[in-house]
Amino acid sequence: MTTGIVVLGATGSIGTTTLKLLEGELGKRFSVKGLVASGRSPEKLAAAGKKHNAQRLVTMGHKAGRRLRKFSGSIPVRTGRDALLEMVCEEDVDIVVVGIPGTAALEPVYSALKAGKKVAMANKESLVSAGSLLLDIAQENGGVLLPVDSEHNAAFRILEGAKRESIHSLLLTASGGPFLHRDPATLDRITPEEAKNHPSWKMGPLVSINSATLMNKGLEVIEAMHLFGLPLDKIDAVIHPPSQVHAIVRWTDGTASFHASPPDMAFALKHALCWPHSPSPPSPPFQPTEIPPLTFGKIDTQRFPCYGLARESAKMGGGAPAVLNAANEIAVSSFLSGKLSFSKIPNVVENTLSAVQGSPQSIGEVLALDNEARRIALNQI
């Protein structure tokens, strides 16, 4: 019997890596029930659907749907939010891979967990904005949330089965991005192409810019608070340019456990797809003699103020992390479109955090707060 799988963001980096894994021996264990993409690459989505015998395709907007139907052949195509939410709840779906960036993934993740699905989560923004709500609905309905970010997947592997009283703290690692040694006086001249040129990972535009500002690592700290039930003062991050070690758990007996792998999302995805069983087929063993020296350093919040802002929003609690995330998405989008300089991204985030407050108690309230934060951020720009 095969496992029914749906991939959200099927034409993005997470989606394509997932589908590539399903092309090999691993694919015999899965049946692709549905693929979802925004509609920017209808030919690519249709081709993936045909290659993996997808039972249905979903895209956003009627215009995108018409374009997709030109290439989809006999595969049924549906469009819009309702179609997406219905797809992740279908009875034949066992696992939902979430590769959609930003809060666009929030409602489908909530719906999938409410339907008791296993969710392989590569989207950190949903947990940042509504982590408690997502974990509560998962617990109430038997849903399972599995982290696919390399850092959280690494921490999950180390911490699985560990006694809470034995954990001293968790350290996530950050490469430092492309501007680790850049003269701060030149940050306002950074171009989007420079900022997207990450030294270790291939990612989408939003995540690439967040990695360059280290906002990504701040969001990951908040995400880890929810996933592992640890307070902020027990979670931090360190600079680790080689991107070989992804998480470090320090134990109360003075020892530490490291989780290492090459900088490739396929390792985390494969683990999440196969959990709770061992990944199959096995991969070649990790070769410590082939990696560069493992160096670690502290994060300079003067150079990377977004990391400090993310931690501050976690201290504020309530809806502050949701406001932080929404303002950051607006600032990054404005930077990518040439309307805002790279150095001004943290200013927009900080000002919005000061202007917008709230303690949302439902997904609807989270989205309302998100919209208000976006409006305030846009007004600044």
Image: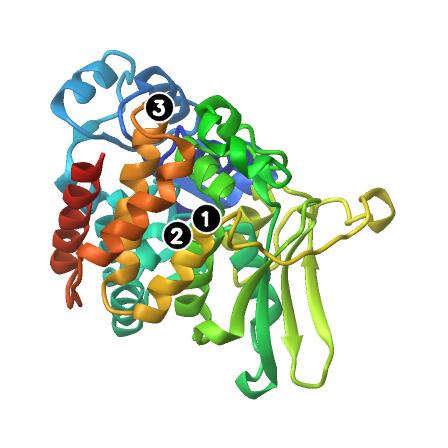
What amino acid is found at the position of numbered circle 2 in the picture? Lys
Give the residue displayed 17% in from the left and 68% down from the top. 359
Residue 334 rendering spot, x and y as whole percentages: 30, 30
Q: State the count of labels.
A: 3
Quick one: which residue is furthest to the front in this view?
185
The residue where tag 3 is placed is 45
Q: Residues within 10 Å of mark 3 (few under 14, many from 20)?
A: many
Residue 247 rendering spot, x and y as whole percentages: 62, 60
Q: Quadrant of residue 65?
A: top left
Q: Nearer the viewer, residue 75 or 167?
A: 167
Mark 3 and 1 residues: CB-CB less than 8 Å, in contact?
Answer: no
Q: Which mark is residue 101?
A: none
Q: Secondary structure at mark 3?
A: helix
What amino acid is found at the position of numbered circle 1 in the picture? Asn
What amino acid is found at the position of numbered circle 3 in the picture? Leu
Quick one: which residue is furthest to the top in this view?
70
Q: CA distance from mark 3 to mark 1?
A: 27 Å
Give the residue displayed 45% in from the left and 36% down from the top. 209
The residue where tag 2 is placed is 124
